[in-house]
Amino acid sequence: MPEPVQYITLTVPDGEIIGYAWADATQIGLVDRPASSSSAYKAGIAWFSRMQDARQRGLTPAGVIALFSHEPGAGPVTEAPDLETIKELARVVTPADDQRLLDQLVPRGHPAWRELAEAFDALTDADREVEWSGGRPQPDGSHHVPYPVYSKPLERAVRALTEVGAVTPEHRWMDNRLPDVPADGGLMDPADAVRAATAVVRGERFSEGRIARAAKDGLLDAVAASLRAWSATPAAAPAPSTASTAVPVTTGPAPSAASAPTLCRYCGGSPAVDVAFRAHLGLLVFLRFRRMDGPVCRMCGLGLHRGFTTYTLCWGWWSPLSLVLFGPLTLVRNVLAARKVERLADPGPGIAGRRFDPGLPLHRRPLAYVALVPVAWVLCLIAAVVCGGG
Ligand SMILES: [Zn+2]
């Protein structure tokens, strides 16, 4: 039987979420984000050791959470239905997480990119079929553990991955799944390529043969293809974090405007993304449009999306123009906006106003099913035309 737990969201000063400290009836714990930066991870360890001190001094688990919720960087005490929900939150990977890994790569145009291209172009199928040595009994009766024998060209290719910065301590490979080779032969996401390169190259030191496996199953080639494509595309506008270094640093605790994260306009939480949600009502000749603009955090965005989309599913069909145009258009725009919102990490503590409650998902809202009436009607119409015509 899952038990509700109380938790607080812990953030570092730049807004990155460290993880979630939780308490149930008997204990406290910390769920860190496997995708977090190494500095956020260390900050989490420091937070938790102070919490454990407080617990050992006799505070109850709920008391510890309540006490630390007042510290800078901690959010208000929130309740989750069970620990699994918090773990789910912690698994969210944000665009900032991806960008942090890409920031580890050497700049485009650096000679290391040329070396990477040449090293991988020089690989042959024989290099990818790694032979193993050892494992047979020795003359003195001892057994040697088998080990892979890597060819010089393969060693060069692996070294080139390190040289471009794709093997980085910023990815905690032990806490994360190894990215897959894209099944459709498409390009791997470049941040995933960094994750895979790090996991394979660093993992080799702990379990020999990881590079052999990655060379054979195509992962190593997929990583190189993705990184080469990334290095060949023009650089996007610098991320806010790097831009802030060009801004003269003001003294005092106030963060400079360039590094300030986008805040949700409804609750003041971050991260937030600038999207708008819409609702439409069409009743014979009576049309009504409603729109609420962002930036919104994940919570407020999902709340707006679910509320407005349910309203549109229910009321957005009942005029000719609404049925063929405004209703579907409103729904599509909301879905596109919701996708951006869903990619955000859970917001840190809000500093202004009320936070929207995401509430029930769409499929559990009865009013959303009103949309089946026009859909069924259109299907009947099509069926009638097809049958009549045949
Ligand atoms: Zn919000």
Image (cartoon, grey):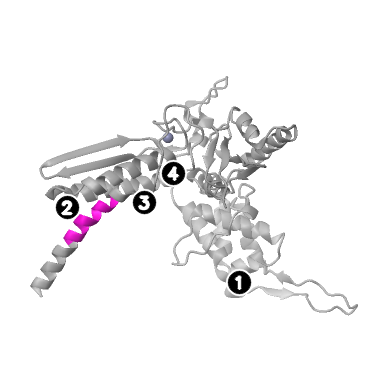
Task: Return the residue nearer the eye: 90 or 131.
Answer: 90
Crowdedness near tag 4: few (<14), some (14–19) or many (≥20) residues, C-alpha within 10 Å: few
Secondary structure beneath disc 4? loop
Quadrant containing the C terminus is bottom left
Residue at mark 1 to residue at mark 3: CA–CA distance: 51 Å
Residue at mark 4 to residue at mark 3: CA–CA distance: 40 Å
Residue at mark 2 to residue at mark 4: CA–CA distance: 38 Å
The residue indicated by pointer 1 is: 128
Majority secondary structure of magenta residues: helix
The residue indicated by pointer 3 is: 364
Crowdedness near tag 1: few (<14), some (14–19) or many (≥20) residues, C-alpha within 10 Å: many
Tell whether 320 sits left or right of 120: left
Q: Residue at the spot x=56%, y=70% of the render?
A: 217
Q: Amino acid at mark 2?
A: Val
Q: Is residue 376 magenta?
A: yes
Q: Residue extending furthest top?
A: 252
The residue indicated by pointer 4 is: 236
Q: Which residues are magenta?
A: 368-378
Mark with earlier residue (3, 2): 2
Label 4 CB less than 8 angstroms from ligand 1 = no
For residue 324, which numbered disc appears in the image?
A: 2
Secondary structure beneath disc 1? helix
